[in-house]
Image (spheres, rainbow, N blue to C red):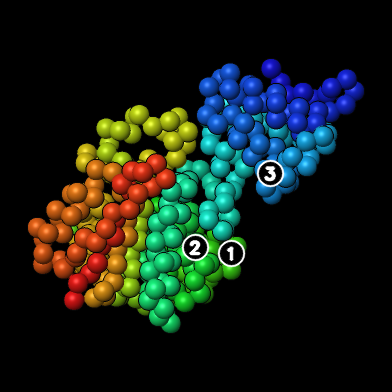
Amino acid sequence: MRCLCTVGKQYPTVGEIIEQWSHRFRSEGIPEPVESIEHIVAHVINTSKTIDLVNNQNNRLTLDQCNKLESLCECRLSRMPVQYIIGEWDFRDITLKLVPPIFIPRPETEILVDFVLKRLNYLQKEKQEILELGCGSGAISLAIAHSNKNVNCIAIDSNLQACELTKDNRDRLGLKNQVTVVHAVLKDDGRIEFLTVLNGPANFDLNSKPFDFVVSNPPYVPTEQILTLSPEIKIYEDLRALDGGHDGLKVIKPLLKYASAILKPGGRLLLEVDSTHPEYIQFFTKKYSTLKLQYEHTYKDFCNNDRFVEILKMS
């Protein structure tokens, strides 16, 4: 079944395309069939927001637009995420370029950004130093820097391709003066192995430089759950950005050690975690009191699951 390339002697309207392809997607088990085709159509006709499709539903596509749309819809039928198909996605109040297999930022992670910004606004310091571990596309650091001009962020990732994408997004958003991108790896002992800086100062030591905040959406999905994820994730996204080991804590444990070493007294670590992790993190901080980390609070996500943890570095 192909796109309605002609209706009589005319090309289909936006409304006809959405109706046809949403039915096709639904019949083949594609998640969010209407939303999927709306985003693809908006991209093809160069409309920034899917809500604008209402005003364009009677407009007819051109032949080139029909051909492009068919190609993109075939990608969706193969379960490619819409974000990769259109090559960009909105996150909070910024638009990010996205390319496979770099992890696609999820809406709930915007909540994590909101918590950081609330803390920043409460403190009202002239300059705040923030480190993000596992930056992916740069969503967290770039959203924070875009909303608060008094922060300097260092965004690190072990995946060089992710670092390059963060740098690209940073430059497109005009945040080069606020965000430094570093290719680096967090080791099991809680230290950072520095690899290279992408267009930024190279005169800092990530194992001694003090930070006001550390923020991360680390890999936290237990390995045994990876196989239960949707094809969109299993086939197209980098599973290293999701796989947190047998208990989901493979990165979180060394990250707690690292945060203890580099957070300033009164500094905070904010994490996105699996709903089973807050209880362990609270236990960990009590057991290893020499780290001087104090569990503060667990926050809910949109589905009322425990999803975010705030930890204080004591004096």
Asked if residue 218 can be seen in this view, the reply is: no
Q: Secondary structure at mark 2?
A: helix
Residue, far bottom: 126
Q: Residue at x 32, y 60 (%)?
A: 270
* Disc 2 to disc 1: CB gap under 8 Å: yes
Q: Is residue 57 above or below residue 264?
A: above
Spot occupied by residue 135 in the image (x, y as percentages of width and height): 42, 57
Q: CA distance from mark 2 to mark 3?
A: 25 Å
Packing grade of label 2 (10 A; few <14, some 14-19, many >=20) is many
For image coordinates 27% across by 36% down, the residue present is 223
Q: Earlier in the sequence, mark 1 or mark 3?
A: 3
Where is the C terminus found, in terms of image quarters?
Answer: bottom left
Residue under circle 2? 142
- Identify which amino acid the numbered label 3 is placed on: Ile
Q: What residue sits right under mark 1 in the picture?
A: 173
- Amino acid under label 2? Leu
Three-letter code for the amino acid on which mark 1 is drawn: Leu
Residue beneath disc 3: 51
61 on left or right of 183: right
Above/below status of 85 relative to 92: above
49 w.r.t. 269: above or below: above
10 Å neighbourhood of mark 1: few (<14), some, or many (≥20)? some
